[in-house]
Image (spheres, grey):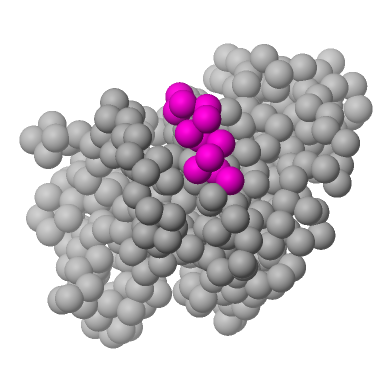
Amino acid sequence: MHESLSLQQARRIALAAQGLDKIRPAGPVGARAVGRIFARLQLVQIDSVNVLARSHYLPFFSRLGNYDRTILQRMTGTHPRRMMEYWAHEASFIRPDHFQDLVLWQNRKWVGAHAMDPELRRGVASRVLEALSDGRPRTAAELTARLGHVEDRQRDNWGWNWNAVKRVLEHLFEEGLVSAASRTESFERRYTLTARVLPDRGGSTASREPDAAAAMDRLIDAAARAHGIGTVRCFADYFRTPVRAAAVSVEHLVEAGRLQPVTVAGWSRQLYRHVEAKLPRTATGRALLSPFDSLVFERRRLEALFGFHYRIEIYTPEPQRRFGYYVLPFLLRDGIVARVDLKADRAGGRLLAKAAHAEPGAPADTAVELAAELQLMAEWLELEKVVVCPTGDLAPALADAVAVGKAAHPL
């Protein structure tokens, strides 16, 4: 008989798996704590939007509070690397252990040069690899300047207008031959040979006999550990792997005792709990969640677990937005109780809460707890004050709580 869980128990399992069930550590946060969180999450999504902070920094703040962002730079730029870039949920920092498995299963042909004339692609690829062989990482613009501009623009691909060098670089990135050594201040990749990022693996899948089925089993096991509990679709979505292949792996993992079928009251899907998933007695955490946080990746799961309907409205015309441009869900204990549209006004030294909305049934202390979280975020971002704009049903109470908190604990 399958284990039967309440929805509240399933929530606590999910929060514990993501490191969001407990109050943050009180002392200084070091590299070891950041590394533990990354090992738990398996990946963090990268996004170029910088209205608040780069998206890959935010999941660590959500779980650890005020930490030094240069820790991530060291994790992505020193050997042995703890993080590297590749396609996963989207463009992501991943654990290097997953790289070879992901190369076998990622299929982002729409991004690179698959539609390019094969002879031109091979010629440009050969020149790119030769240029990178001297060991110096280069951006696409630097490589274009070095090799000479190669015209073969593809104008119907999401509005991108990449030249052939950039398209071939993305093709080589997808194939696993080229990686990102680092990012520039303007967030451009500095490309290098993958053999220089992972010198002990030769930059290819050669060090491990390719076995797509075993690779999928490892990826789904990792995704299930990061979820704690979920459906086949949840697990497949984490690394953006095919659902049918993920379903086969779920069967393998059930047979191996790694996953256990469970039922959850109010969640009408076939669910699985990872054997290592913890069920805490209570959830005491508090966090603002990035729009790209791994807890909110799978929107259907988010709604089934928390009753929280969430859409990113960055690409929605402003008059049609319901809640704002860059809206972060606010997690309090075992519920998502509010959402707040945030912007870092770096020139003015202000963290702007442009709108704040409470969820139905939000607890009485929502505004006070959210105010404390905003004060902590402002401190982390080195901003002098929190400013609450008068938009949203939670805004008046939040403004009052911020004013009280500022008087008691000035930044």
Q: Determine the main secondary structure of the stretch shown in magenta.
A: helix
Tell me if residue 411 comes above or below residue 281 in the rendering: below
Decide which of 166, 22 is in the foreground and name it. Answer: 166
Q: Residue at point 43% right, 55% down?
A: 147
Tell me residue 42's x, y (percent).
66, 49
Residue 85 appears left or right of 356: right
For the point 59% across and 81% down, the residue is: 27
From where the camera sits, is residue 391 visible?
yes
Q: Viewed as shown, does residue 278 lie left or right of 140?
A: right
Which quadrant is the N terminus positioned in? top right
Q: Quadrant of residue 11?
A: top right
**Where does residue 196 sit, x and y in percent of width and height?**
68, 62
Extreme residue toward the right, this view: 256
184 versus 102 height, above or below: below
Q: Quadrant of residue 245?
A: top right
Image check: 345 left or right of 107? left
State the residue in front, 244 or 135.
135
Look at 20% across and 34% down and name the residue there.
Answer: 316
**Quarter of the figure that contains the C terminus:** bottom left
Position in image of residue 96 (x %, y %) = 71, 53
Above or below, 91 relative to 351: above
Position of residue 410 measured from the top left corner of the image (x, y, whole percent): 28, 85
Q: Nearer the viewer, residue 350 or 317?
A: 317
Tell me if 310 is positioned left or right of 357 in this view: right
Taking the magenta stretch, the answer to whether it contains residue 120 is yes
Q: Which residues are magenta?
A: 115-126
